[in-house]
Image (spheres, rainbow, N blue to C red):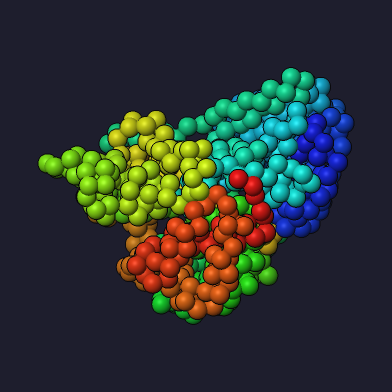
Amino acid sequence: MCGILGFIGTRWRAHAALGLSAIKSRGPDEQTVLDLGEAVLAHTRLAVIDLAGGHQPMTSADGRHTIVFNGEIYNFAELRNALEGKGHVFATRSDTEVLLQGYREWGEGLLPRLDGMFAFALWDRMERRLFAARDALGIKPLMYGAVDGGLVFASTLAPFLALPDFPRRLDPEALRDYLAFQVALAPHTFLAAVQQLPPAHCLRFDAASGRLETSRWWSIPRARPCTDDRETLVVRTDTAIRESVKRQLVADVPLGAFLSGGIDSSLMVRYMAEAGGAPLKTFSLRFADAGFDESAHAQAVAAAFGCEHHVLDAPAIDADTFAATIHDLDQPLADPAYVMTHALARLTREHVTVAISGDGGDEVFGGYPRFLDTEDRHPQRPGQALLRRLVEAGLLPAGLLRRGLWGQDLLLYRRGELGPWPVGRKNLAAYLAPDIRATARPENTLGLWRDQIAELGGKMDAATLMRADLWTYLSENCLAKTDRASMAHGLEVRVPLLGQPVLEATLGLPAEAHFAGGTKALLTELARRHLPETVWNRPKHGFSVPLDKLFNGPWRGRCEDALTRIEQLAPFLDAGAARRAWRDGLSRRGSRRLAYTLVVLLLWLERHGLSA
């Protein structure tokens, strides 16, 4: 697990060391800058596999190809055997060298062969071309900017923000999606000059011509009819998860697991314990102010599988700690759980270097009730079209807008905090300064989510809603949150429920396979068979952050100080609308999530100012 950075041409190549220092926490063990002439590749390493031999940037024996890589390839041993059978000779035990040799043998055909989380870039000195790629579900990030006649790429936005005089103009469309969805959606980033390579995409840059192109190397499969009986599906799922966990236990450093006491993390512990070895180290966070305490459920799982369990008390997040945690982000991310994930990662890193997580279980296995809120449940009723026209014309109160929506429009209204609505409390344009409204394109709010639905058939049924979340909520929120929080402390987090064996076994299943008798039916059945009842026979909880108490208590002064400076920090916002949103959230008359979204943006801008 690492951070990568590179320059093809451009005047910023002279500042490679400065850019690399901005992502040092991603790889605290080693930082290297390699000048290859036309290209400069840099790498900051968290050593996990082949501690002595896996140094990067790594160059082929003939000097033609050089690679920088962030992530882990879990089937690298099998790929290495195949490459050795074709005559390749290896100098290290690392998965990095398998990527390097694999590209030389198979070219872009390497990508579908990989089981792993990855973002890598490979420079061909002879052809003067760069090839880069990102894993299928976007577990690892990759940003790039075609500027100054060349290319700059990095794991996150942090190096771009550190480069002297790098263009710092805001991308209005990133702001739009952030206000609606709490994150910027690929390919947008908060910097207009930088794009995020979407999941399952690759990039090619020709230094001679300056031509840059991207393409998709994998697509989310549509649901297929399934005639298998229930038991067959459960057994197949069990086998796939077992194989995925087994593959992801390879490490030359201490390894443990997050254990919340929920189904997903508890199943990870079950398969890890089954794989044997030394007593498994598990970690859970106990919240003093969350209104519930799941540590007893985690303790029950740990006891069942003989784990060395650590209950870590969540620290008090005062105003300065909150602000510092937001400052750590490379771009705003307004999921309140990020703050606690950041704390969990810091405490866990005191014990292990790698942690297994249950992330992805809800998205891949149907864990959210919203997947069942389908468009056919909201048919058009008589008078709705007229009601909507009258509301939008200002002839009826704006608060009636929701009653005039049906089908896909209603689901879009529910999905975003703000949106393309000309009136009412979710009118995104009302929160933007007038001179930025047109370029933000409010009408394209959640365009990536809607594009995924259109590509998958256009109907918002359960199967399509599940799949549309994979490259939006999962990749851009859940996985980004875990990546940024963990790598801030040099902790590698692995997600076996998104491993290749699991994806191959489950992504093509119809929705009814996951919702037979409730949400997440397949994983719940495995939990019933293999986990203590306290895990599966209780209501679901996630990280719950008590925003009411924090807004009205320790965070209030810090937040309100930032709100007094909106005109200076965020001239692209409508200051009056933002302050009203804060007051309404504080008094519970409005959305606390929107208030949090605005506060996070302002605190981030304190550290990373942008121009409109």
Instruction: Let me know if residue 76 appears in the view.
Output: yes
Q: Nearer the viewer, residue 222 or 578?
A: 578
Identify the residue at horizontal 26%, vertical 43% (top origin): 393
Give how far across and how far down residue 107 sits, in percent: 67, 25
Write down the quadrant of residue 29 in the picture. bottom right
Residue 78 makes an appearance in the image: no
Q: Quadrant of the rendered structure where residue 233 is?
A: top left
The residue depicted at 40 percent of the width and 38 percent of the height is: 443
The x and y percentages for residue 192 are 62, 39
Question: Which quadrant would residue 469 be assigned to in this image?
Answer: top left
Q: Nearer the viewer, residue 410 or 402?
A: 402
Q: Residue at x 27, y 36 (%)?
A: 227
Q: Position of residue 204 (x, y in %)?
A: 67, 27
Of residue 79 and residue 480, the one placed in the foreground of this image is 480
Judge whether 50 appears above or below 546 on screen.
above
501 sits left or right of 412 in the view: right
Tell me the quarter of the image containing the C terminus: top right
Q: Residue at x 80, y 31 (%)?
A: 9
Q: Nearer the viewer, residue 276 or 113?
A: 113
Indicate whether 238 appears above or below 556.
Answer: above
Q: Can you give x and y, in whole percent of width and height, for residue 180 in the image? A: 44, 50
Q: What is the total number of numbered labels drawn onto the structure image?
A: 0
